[in-house]
Image (tube, rainbow, N blue to C red):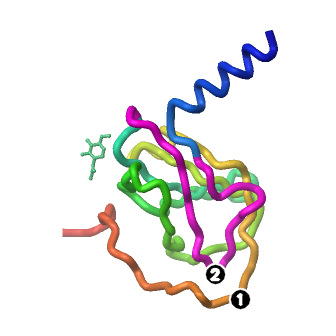
Amino acid sequence: MRSALTLLAFAASALAYTVTEPDASTGWTTSGPNVVAWQSVSTDPANFTIVLDNQVQQPPTTQVLDALVVGSEGKITVNPPSGGWKAGKGFRVNLVADTEHLTTILAQSPQFDIVASTSSTFSTAVTATSGSSSTL
Ligand SMILES: *[C@@H]1O[C@H](CO)[C@@H](O)[C@H](O)[C@H]1NC(C)=O
């Protein structure tokens, strides 16, 4: 009985986006580069939005890191949010449908920490992503 249920859970999780990085052991740093990696199957939506979420700290924060990420890429280095990376515990990366539907979660990482790092290997150059905030 128990093993049948376990199998079902595995089968279900194999049918959609799964966040493989970051997790509790890899974590992120305030200097970056910070990577999000995922697995997908052909029936998944073609693209999604990456959100950094923290419901553990007060006040809770939800920040869009990257919109219209192409699902087949499997991995992306995300740019810091406007205020930069903040060290802390209890972060999760959510893959959500799009910037209008931040609560439509396709996949969620385990909780992880962002640790302070003074290393400056990360270029803060803004890479052109399909802008969701451009004004006409
Ligand atoms: C994103 O995916 C949706 C379907 O999931 C599709 O309709 C849309 O054209 C895609 N947008 C881009 C920019 O790839």
| Amino acid type at image mark 1 | Thr
User: Residue 118 — which label?
Assistant: 1
Measured in 3D between alpha carbons, the distance from the residue under mark 2 to the one under mark 1, in whole angstroms, is 6 Å
Q: Position of residue 98 (x, y in %)?
A: 39, 47
In the displayed structure, does residue 24 sit left or right of residue 108?
Answer: right
The residue positioned 49% from the left and 84% from the top of the image is 124
Q: Is residue 77 left or right of residue 100?
A: right
Give me the disc on residue 104: none
Q: Say what secondary structure mark 1 lies in.
A: loop
Residue sitting at x 55%, y 56%: 37
Farthest-out residue, top = 1
Give the residue type at disc 2. Ser
Q: Is residue 65 above or below residue 23?
A: below
Q: Give the range drawn in magenta.
A: 19-43
* 27 is within the stretch colored magenta: yes
Q: Is residue 125 above or below residue 75?
A: below
Q: Which of marks 2 and 1 is nearer the N terminus?
A: 2
Q: Quadrant of the C terminus?
A: bottom left
Quarter holding residue 4: top right
Q: Judge whether residue 76 can be spotted in this image.
A: yes
Q: What's the mark number on residue 31?
A: 2
Task: In the rendered view, tell whether residue 53 sits above or below residue 41.
Answer: below
Image quadrant, ligand 1? top left
**Contact flag, marks 2 and 1 (Cβ < 8 Å):** yes
Residue 32 pos. (x, y %): 61, 77
**x, y (%) of residue 33?**
58, 76
